[in-house]
Image: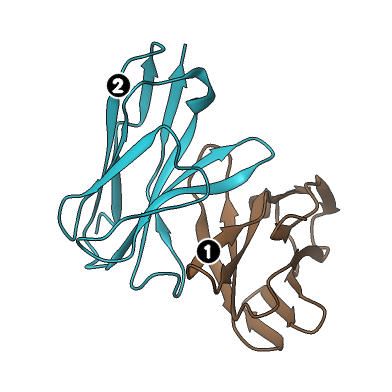
Amino acid sequence: QKEVEQNSGPLSVPEGAIASLNCTYSDRVSQSFFWYRQYSGKSPELIMSIYSNGDKEDGRFTAQLNKASQYVSLLIRDSQPSDSATYLCAVRVEYGNKLVFGAGTILRVKS
Amino acid sequence: NAGVTQTPKFQVLKTGQSMTLQCAQDMNHNSMYWYRQDPGMGLRLIYYSASEGTTDKGEVPNGYNVSRLNKREFSLRLESAAPSQTSVYFCASSVRQGSYGYTFGSGTRLTVV
């Protein structure tokens, strides 16, 4: 089992819809979770971090964390074509205190 | 405000050649990292430096060496390049090891033929 798993996609949504991206992780004691956006040919860019169970909102983005289910999600409201990118979930694992990344989910927003 | 600077951006090597990828950050971060990114594999940690003067192996260290030259600079060396090392390499830094988010450099696209 991979430490951080994501559906590779592509996830296709129409412009203006809500995009829902999901991530599961295996380290039960992990405390820090991050979402990165990566445009094709570019480097990853941090868009959200979450540390506590529940929801965290920032503009059109909402991160959701459920530690009991070992599940993190990212919701993008009012999706725009400019949101089309690969979204990487990252989890800080306690052994070695390192970030482990999922393989990413490709999101395509169609206008 | 440069952030994390990587050089070169592109490189083609022949099998068996050596090269060093350079990385420098100007954010006064303590921790620095080298990742490689391959299609379908996500980002995999090669080596990291939790603080100046320390380095540790990550998930895929074989075939690589690193040097934390000072607080700003962290280089990655391929002693004898192999086609399996064809990848995109990213350097990243953070305030502390594993904390907060990482800031990434723009990447080096390396092809070994």
The lab-note entry on whether marks 2 and 1 share a chain reads no
Instruction: Residue B18: give its label.
Output: 2
Q: Quadrant of residue B11?
A: top left
Residue depicted at x 78% and y 47% = A8
Letter of the chain that mark 2 sits on in the rendering: B
Above or below residue A29? Residue B3 is above
Residue at numbered disc 1: A99
- Numbered marks: total: 2
Secondary element at image label 1: strand
**Residue B33 appears in the figure:** no
Letter of the chain that mark 1 sits on in the rendering: A
Front-most of A22 and B76? B76
**Residue A70 appears in the figure:** yes
**What residue type is disc 1 on?**
Leu
Q: As drawn, is A110 to the left or to the right of A86?
A: right
Residue depicted at x 24% and y 59% = B1
Q: As drawn, is A68 to the left or to the right of B8?
A: right
Above or below residue B63? Residue A22 is below
Tell me the CA gap for discs 2 and 1. 28 Å
